[in-house]
């Protein structure tokens, strides 16, 4: 598996996990211990050496947008779309820095 494919797969799994967690929380379950913590690995694979809180905040905002746009009916299509968007935005941030 190529590095970009691995990163895209991990981003998709993070989105999928967040969708599942939110659905279970709506049903009344406490899912805090089942949250997938792979954001640091994703950012490291993308080449980030420094990972300030603002970078994580921006990353999770992108994940939240993806979750809001994705449903069980269009999951495969949206996961593909959003992993590309997130990958590209993170690459841009890694090269040019965080937006103000």
Image (cartoon, rainbow, N blue to C red):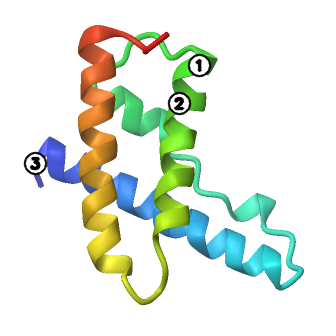
Instruction: Determine whether label 1 and label 2 are within 8 Å by CB.
Output: yes
Q: Position of residue 48 (x, y in %)?
A: 36, 18
Work out whether mark 3 precedes mark 1 in sequence or the reverse, and give the earlier one.
3
Vertical side of 27 occupied by 99: above or below: above
Q: Position of residue 67 (x, y in %)?
A: 53, 63
Question: What label sits on residue 54 in the rendered view?
Answer: 1
Decide which of 13, 95 is in the foreground and name it. Answer: 95
Vertical side of 26 occupied by 3: above or below: above
Question: What label sits on residue 58 in the rendered view?
Answer: 2
Q: Residues within 10 Å of mark 3 (few under 14, many from 20)?
A: few
Work out whether mark 2 precedes mark 3 in sequence or the reverse, and give the earlier one.
3
Label 1 SS: helix
Name the residue rendered at 58%, 48% in the picture.
37
Label 2 SS: helix
User: Alpha-carbon distance for marks 1 and 2?
Assistant: 6 Å
Question: What label sits on residue 2 in the rendered view?
Answer: 3
């Amino acid at each position: 598996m190529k590095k970009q494919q691995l990163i895209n797969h991990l981003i998709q799994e993070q989105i999928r996990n967040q969708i599942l967690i939110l659905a279970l929380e709506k049903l009344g379950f406490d899912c805090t211990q089942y949250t997938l913590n792979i954001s640091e690995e994703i950012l490291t694979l993308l080449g980030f050496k420094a990972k300030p809180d603002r970078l994580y905040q921006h990353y999770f905002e992108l994940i939240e947008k993806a979750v809001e746009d994705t449903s069980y009916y269009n999951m495969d299509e949206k996961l593909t779309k959003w992993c590309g968007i997130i990958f590209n935005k993170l690459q841009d941030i890694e090269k040019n820095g965080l937006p103000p």
